[in-house]
Each structure stands twice: as C-alpha cells, then as structure tokens.
Image (spheres, rainbow, N blue to C red):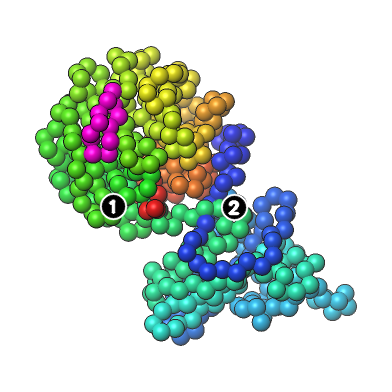
Amino acid sequence: MRIISVLALLLSSFYWLNAGQQSQIQGNIVAHPGKPLIAVPDFRGAGGASPLMTAFNSTVLADLQASPLINFVPKTLYPLQLPQQPSDLVAGVAQPGARPTNPQGNRLSDWSLPPISANYLGIGYGAENKGMLVVFGWFYTSAPNIPALQQAQIFGKVYTASLDEAGAIDAGHRYAADILSQFGGKSLVGTRIVFVSDRTGSKEIWVMNWDGTDQRQITRYRSISTFPSASPDGRIVAFTTYAPGYPAIQMFSLDTARKLPFYNQRASMNAFVTFTPDSKRIVFSSTLAGGAAQLYMSSVDGGSLHRLTSSGYIEVEAKINPKTGADLVDVSGRTGLPQIYHMNMEGANQERLSAGTGEATNPAWNPDGDHIAFAWTKGFEPGNYNIFVMDVASRQTVQLTANEGRNENPSWAPDGAHIVYGSRRSRESQIWVMNADGTGKHALTTAGSNEKPVWVNAEQ
C-alpha cells in the first residue's frame, strides 16, 4: 500500500479526548522524537472491583494499541514489581553503585531503562465504594531527570462507573482517552454509527456504538430503508424509505427515538440528505422536476425548498463541507461515468475533483474541511471499488484499501482519524473501520449484510 504525505495533516489531529472528569494536571509533557513509548501495567482491584479489572485492562490495552499517536510497550517487557499507586514509586535515579542490572519497577526511572524504554508510565487500581466501581488512575513521565514524583505526574483522576463489566469498560475507555488526550487526541466515546442492515429480512436502519457494541434496530418498516445520514449535532438521522409506497425522506430523532415531520415532494427519487453545519438545513437529490435527479435545498422539515443545480445530468450524494458550510461536493454524471464535483452552496463555480477516469463515488468530508474520502474504481485494483483520500486543494490521493474485496461508502469519525466503510469480502457486506492511514482495519458487524455506514457525532 502506498502512503504519501497527504495524510500528515490527517494524523496530526488524532484520537481521544475525554470530557466531564475532574483532573489535576501537573507538569508538561516532554517532547520525544517519533511516537512516545507508553507502559501501563495491569490495574488490580479489591472487593467487587477485582473480577472487573480484566475488562478494564483489556479495554485500556485495546485503545492504546489502536492509537497511531503512541507506541505501547508490550507487557512482556515489564519488570516484576508493578506499581499500583504513587506510594509504590520512588522518583529520581539510583546511585551508580545501587543500580540493579535489570529495572525493578519501583523507581519511576526504571521504566525509562532498556528493555522497557518507556517515556511515560500509567498506573492505578480499582475498588468498590457504595456499590460503584471506582478506579484510581495516574499518568507520569518517566524521564530520569525529574527529581520529584509530583513534578513527574501529568494527571491523577478518579473514574466512577457502575459495578459491572459495562462500567469497567467505560472506565477503561475514559482512562485511555485521558492518556491519549495528552498527545492532542479526541474521544470517540459517545459517538455512534448508523448503518443499513438486512439481518431481519428487510433493509432497515440500525445504530451501534462507535466500537460496534450495542447494535440496535431503528426502523421496523419491513420495506427498504436506506441512504442514512446524520445531523452534525448528533440528534437527527435522515434516510430514504420506500415504506409509504414511494421513496420518501424521513427524519428520525435519536433523542426520542421518534419520527420527525418532513414534507416530501412526490417524486421517483428523494434521497441523499446532507445537513448544514448548524443542522438546520439540508441538501438532497430529487427528481421532483422530472428528468435527472438534481440537488435541492430546504429547511430540516422540508420547507423553504429551492433548487441548486440544473445540469441535466444526475446529481447525487451531495456532502456539505462541515468546516465552512459554504461549499459542497457531489457525484455527477455530466461527463458519462460518475465523477466527484465541487461547487458553492448555490450550485455555482462547479469543478471536477476526481480524475475523470473510472467511477468516483461516495464522497465524505473529513471534519477538517480539507480532505475527502471516496470510493474509486482506479488505483492498485482497477475495476473494483476501493477507498481513497484526497487533499481537495492539491487533488493528491492516497489509496487506503486494495485486494480486500469491494470497499465503498466511507464516513469519517468525528476525530478525523478513523474511517468507517462497507466492505464486501464474501457474499455479504459488513461494516469495517480503519485508521485514516489505512491501518488497523477490523470488522464491526458480522450478522446479515450491512452497508452504508455513517458516523454520528456525540449529542451536543
């Protein structure tokens, strides 16, 4: 796989940022060349917390190992003495005559020595208090030139959660998020993915957590419901359903799990909704004027309708720039095969972004407003759809998938660092996720055939 420098900007904004926790930050992170090396020994627990720490530790490990921001030091390299709280640690460097051949683990600087060579150390433990899980977590720089533990501590926090496996997983996500936030990350915790699944016999709209857990059915129309999209505030899902007997756009509240009003124009196609950054207006494709589908803008309830394009060719899959709200991309058939075009919000200043060869479809904006992901039938596996990323200004592209089945319908995570997409590697399609550089690919669904994922912001 060829990776070029266009991803440098994508990787600079990576990962998790936790909110809503009280913290005490002490000291600044020391810059290290390359990715920092981080060690986190397993937390132990007492009382009712003890059996839950396995779930906590595995969650922290998975989150840190998946991050492109850091290198996680394998636990097989750790010393025998594993600190659990600050009182287990000694700051500073041992005198030359007292230095052990191998790091013992009780001195903070031990963790900076080979074979561990960690730049940072995370420690902590779990306990039960009043029927709740309470996890104490600390994070230190292990630089040997810091004389006092208080100066080496970057944060110390208390994480309270339900006294069950779900609570342990939640606390683990939050602790890992706090570590990664020290390196400029952003959290996906609380975000969701909406997708289309036929696992109940009809194509229905489903939703799941960002990590594939808690997969739930939204619609039960026993018809075709497809082409989902989501409002930037994370409150509304829009999709096209054939349940009324014709293709109608439906708005659905994720807050109340109820249908919202939307006035549909009777047409042979109403689909591909995209929201403005303020979540108050939409652009969609419709054949309400007859002929090829064109782009229309309306309020979120279908009112104040006006037409944006009059090209005479199919105009679909519009996506409004989430950063500016002043421009959009869409897929047009004006040159024959579908290609991706760029225009302002009134349909003017149209220019083709894609190369004009093969079929270029499914554009999706990165939250930075500078890059799009899209599906293209060119590249290293010509003829098959694969996921690419384009720097809109330079038109440089990077191919992220190849020889992994048919890959399409990419959607960016709110952190700008992950992409969810549909991949058909066998008879059925499944929802997959990957890092923005094409690494870390793994499936989120396995039941039925699943497609057209859309990453939904946490509710604002």
Vertical order, 308 against 190 (above or below): above
User: Sequence order check: which comes first, mark 1 or mark 2?
Assistant: 2
Image quadrant for the N terminus? top right
Q: Is residue 136 above or below residue 449?
A: below
Is residue 358 or residue 364 the one in the foreground? 364
Q: Amino acid at mark 2?
A: Gly
Q: Nearer the viewer, residue 152 or 306?
A: 306
* Residue at x-position 72% and y-position 67%: 142
**Mark seen at residue 184:** 2
Q: Return the x and y of residue 15 as percentages of the image width and height.
A: 53, 52
Asked whether, in this view, residue 67 is left or right of residue 303, the answer is: right
In the rendered image, residue 118 lying in the magenta stretch gets the answer no
At mark 1, the secondary structure is loop
State whether residue 427 appears in this view: no
Q: Which residue is mark 1?
A: 254
Q: Residue at x 19, y 43 (%)?
A: 261
Question: Which stretch appears magenta?
Answer: 296-307
Q: Amino acid at mark 1?
A: Leu
Q: Is residue 92 left or right of residue 393?
A: right
Q: Disc 1 and disc 2: Cα gap in Å?
A: 29 Å
Q: Quadrant of residue 189?
A: bottom left
Q: Few, some or many C-alpha atoms within 10 Å of disc 2 (few <14, some 14-19, many ≥20)?
A: some
Looking at the rendered structure, the secondary structure element under dot 2 is loop
Residue 90 visible in image: yes
